[in-house]
Image: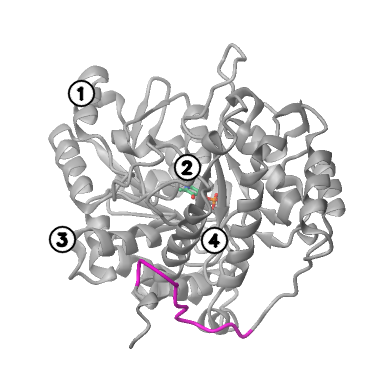
Amino acid sequence: MPDVRFHRGEGLPLEMHKARIVQKLELKPIEERAASMAGAGYNTFLLRNSDVFIDMLTDSGTNAMSDRQLAAMMMADDAYAGSETFYRLDETIRRIFGKKYFLPAHQGRACESIISQVFVGPGSVVPMNYHFTTSKAHIVLNGGRIEELLVEEGLDVTSEHPFKGDMDTAALSSLIDDVGAKNIPFVRIEAGTNLIGGQPFSLANLREVRGICDDRGIMIVLDASLLADNLYLMKRREEACADMSIEEITREVSDLCDVVYFSARKLGCARGGGMCLDDDDAYLRMREMIPLYEGFLTYGGMSVREMEALAVGLEETMDEDVISQGPEFTAYAVGRLRERGVPVVLPAGGLGAHVDAKAFLDHIPAEHYPAGALAAAFFVASGVRGMERGTMSEQRDEDGSEHPAHMELLRLALPRRVFTVSQLEYVVDRLGWLYENRHLVEGLRFVEEPEILRFFFGKLEPLSAWPERLVEQYTRDFGDSL
Ligand SMILES: *Cc1c(COP(=O)(O)O)cnc(C)c1O
């Protein structure tokens, strides 16, 4: 009998690659993990990577490169202006996305800064399926505000709706009626919606949004940073995409949008970013900003080596086997965590497993940062570094009061092609243990709180001696085992 556990989308994920370069890891004893977490102000962003066993903070710049990417890096053409490397990248991107122009930038948020400076002003309203931290920050910095018009199921942690990143199109129409099309510089659609658990939008929904925007003369800007997962999940979940190639789905998506921008730290498994578009006038206005903030037009802040890796990485993104790895590992992790009773965002999306800290630590109120406390507690319990995506990642309201997040998530990102099933089993086991001992974990409070994007540098302290109690319990249960 064949082993049916290797079906895509269920059972064991099967790697379509092999590892030929590896990096040694160290698993420090729990007392040292507790000390380094305290030293980092209970903020996993401030940990040193040498203190971390499995780094699931983010997929940003941490995906494994392929042999072909590394080989391409050796062939890079170094030049300030007119590098052959740039022309190779430019040609690849324009072919994949079918746009006339490509503008390079040093990373995704640089694109957001440029797009916001060019199109957003005081009084602007930018509707979007859901915000991302840096995309919102740049719109607000330029005097605009955002409106999140996610479908209702999107914020329901346990809804198994296949496209929780879809936009509520009725809400979009009525928002345009309310604020007027002239105050809406663009509608922003985010692929693989990051902050709600890597959830995809559907092609059908994007077509509907396009129809509405066409009627009102409004641009669509696609944040394609997490497009690879979105493409794979469209192909698996949307009937209309089942017989299309990844290349065809990409073109269809791109054709429905006016501007496509991305972080190449995620899309294409390299580092950098860029924007592509067809409109001559918008291109000229955006182009002016590149030498000012990024670098000359033929590198935009990227090294030639990264540009070579990106060109190859984007080609490889068009291969279904290559992009299957992220969502398949995520589905496996989510399935195993559910078996241990750990509350997770459903259905499994891209990017990683997202633990529902509101349900996990339902005794901790939003103002004591349940997702931040869970990230800190989990690092102590395992040496695994996740990221808080909850109230800490929000900014306070203008009157200084907390702005509770819709969701309190511990994100366990799965950098593509980096971890193994056994490492995931370790993650599942320690998180399962923490869930059984969740009553030991209490909240955090800020001792140093930056005003903007406080989650990056902010330092916190525990509200009680709960980390010590966690260490004691762990030592009793695990003794000298790993
Ligand atoms: C990471 C990310 C960005 C920002 O990209 P950087 O390269 O980190 O600046 C923007 N949007 C989404 C959806 C992202 O995941």
Element marked by disc 1: helix
User: In the figure, residue 79 lies in which quadrant?
Assistant: bottom right
Distance from label 4 to label 2 (Cα)? 15 Å
Q: Quadrant of the C terminus?
A: bottom right
Q: Magenta segment: does it hold 57?
A: no
Element marked by disc 3: helix
Instruction: Give the mark, 3 or 1, whose residue is nearer the N terminus.
Output: 1
Question: Decide: marks 4, 3 in contact (CB < 8 A)?
Answer: no
Q: Position of residue 375 (x, y in %)?
A: 66, 44
Instruction: Give the mark, 4 or 2, whose residue is nearer the N terminus.
Output: 2
Distance from label 4 to label 1 (Cα)? 38 Å
Instruction: Give the mark, 3 or 2, whose residue is nearer the N terminus.
Output: 2
Q: Magenta segment: does it hold 16?
A: yes
Residue at the far front in the pictured view: 476
Some atom of ligand 1 lies within 8 Å of the CB belonging to the residue at label 1:
no
Instruction: Give the mark, 4 or 1, whose residue is nearer the N terminus.
Output: 1
Instruction: Give the mark, 4 or 3, whose residue is nearer the N terminus.
Output: 3
* Residue that mark 2 sits on: 195
Q: Given the image, on which type of amino acid does mark 4 rest?
A: Leu
Label 1 packing within 10 angstroms: few (<14), some (14-19), many (20+): few
Q: Main secondary structure of the magenta part?
A: loop
* Residue that mark 1 sits on: 174
Instruction: Give the mark, 2 or 1, whose residue is nearer the N terminus.
Output: 1
* Residue that mark 4 sits on: 414
Q: Is residue 92 above or below residue 105?
A: below
Q: Position of residue 351 (x, y in %)?
A: 48, 56
Question: Decide: marks 3, 2 in contact (CB < 8 A)?
Answer: no
